[in-house]
Image (cartoon, rainbow, N blue to C red):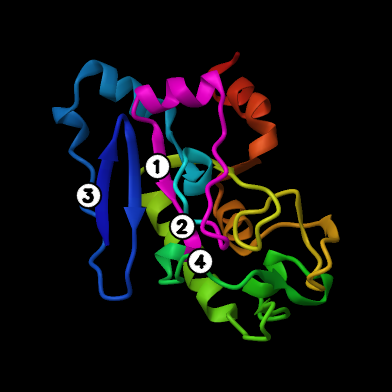
């Protein structure tokens, strides 16, 4: 796994043989401004929302918002594509949670994640979720802003597994695991609510 810095943003790229990210610097060596940011917690963000072309179709889905720009400048964003963290390529076949189920069902072994080509990639998505949680905990993330609709990052609506474009209420595998471990998860279209919660704005 390698780490790159981009104007206040941390982007993690995982590989199967990579080592875990280095531990954050001790808080005692941080500046007052850095300590203030650490006290407020960081935000895990879907890489595609930050302009990284990591989606299954090889594209990004950048989100433009003043709060996101401010959090980036403050160094509060931790960026990840869970699927890429588990070694999935770009581009890759579309994937959905089968049978109209949700991410929690995948975590409990009651549902599968399948590709449009018929491949079963359940274990890859479970690993992707574990990677996202590990990174969130190691970097002090208290909240997550994730792209909705994804079988990994979706937090309000996901596709129903029929590859017909139909959605239903549910969450992706990574979003479900983050929530189970106390991370507050917001969809990209809920950024105003996220800003209100963490900034009081």
Which comes before the other along the chain, label 2 or label 3?
A: 3
- Dot 4 and dot 1 residues touching (CB under 8 Å): no
The answer to whether any part of residue 126 appears in the image is yes
In the rendering, which numbered label is found on residue 23? 3
Marks 1 and 2, the one that precedes in the sequence: 1
Circle 4 residue? 91
Please state the horizontal and vertical placement of residue 99, each as a whole percent of the image.
82, 76
Up-down relation of residue 9 to residue 84 (above or below): above
Quadrant assignment, res 7 = top left
Q: Quadrant of residue 75?
A: top left
Task: Tell whether 29 sits left or right of 187.
Answer: left
Look at 46% across and 71% down and name the residue there. Answer: 88
Contact check, label 4 and label 3, Cβ < 8 Å: no
Q: Which residue is mark 2?
A: 132
Rendered image: mark on residue 78: 1
Magenta-colored stretch includes residue 140: no
What is the CA distance from the residue labelled 2 to the residue labelled 3? 16 Å
Q: What is the quadrant of the C terminus in the image?
A: top right
Q: Considering the image in quadrants, where does the N terminus appear? A: bottom left
Whole-angstrom CA distance, mark 4 to mark 3, is 31 Å
* Separation of marks 3 and 1 at Cα, in angstroms: 14 Å
Helix, strand or loop at disc 2?
Answer: helix
- Lower sequence index among marks 2 and 4: 4
Within the image, what quadrant is residue 180 found in? bottom right
Q: Secondary structure at mark 1?
A: strand
Mark 1 closeness class: few <14, some 14–19, many ≥20 residues within 10 Å: many
């Amino acid at each position: 796994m390698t780490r790159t810095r981009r104007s206040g943003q941390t982007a993690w790229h995982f590989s199967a043989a990579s080592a875990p990210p280095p531990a954050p610097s001790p808080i005692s060596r941080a500046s007052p401004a850095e300590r203030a940011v650490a006290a407020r917690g960081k935000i895990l963000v879907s890489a595609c929302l930050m302009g990284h072309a990591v989606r299954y179709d090889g594209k990004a889905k950048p989100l433009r918002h003043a709060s996101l720009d401010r959090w980036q400048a403050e160094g509060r964003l931790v960026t990840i594509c869970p699927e890429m963290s588990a070694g999935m390529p770009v581009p890759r076949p579309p994937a959905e949670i089968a049978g109209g189920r949700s991410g929690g069902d995948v975590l409990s072994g009651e549902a599968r994640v399948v590709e449009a080509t018929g491949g079963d990639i359940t274990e890859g998505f479970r690993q992707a979720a574990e990677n996202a949680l590990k990174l969130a905990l190691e970097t002090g993330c208290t909240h997550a802003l994730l792209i909705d609709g994804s079988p990994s990052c979706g937090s309000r609506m996901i596709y129903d597994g029929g590859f017909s474009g139909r959605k239903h209420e549910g969450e992706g595998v990574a979003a479900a695991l983050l929530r189970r471990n106390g991370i507050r998860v917001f969809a990209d279209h809920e950024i105003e609510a996220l800003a209100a919660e963490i900034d009081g704005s």
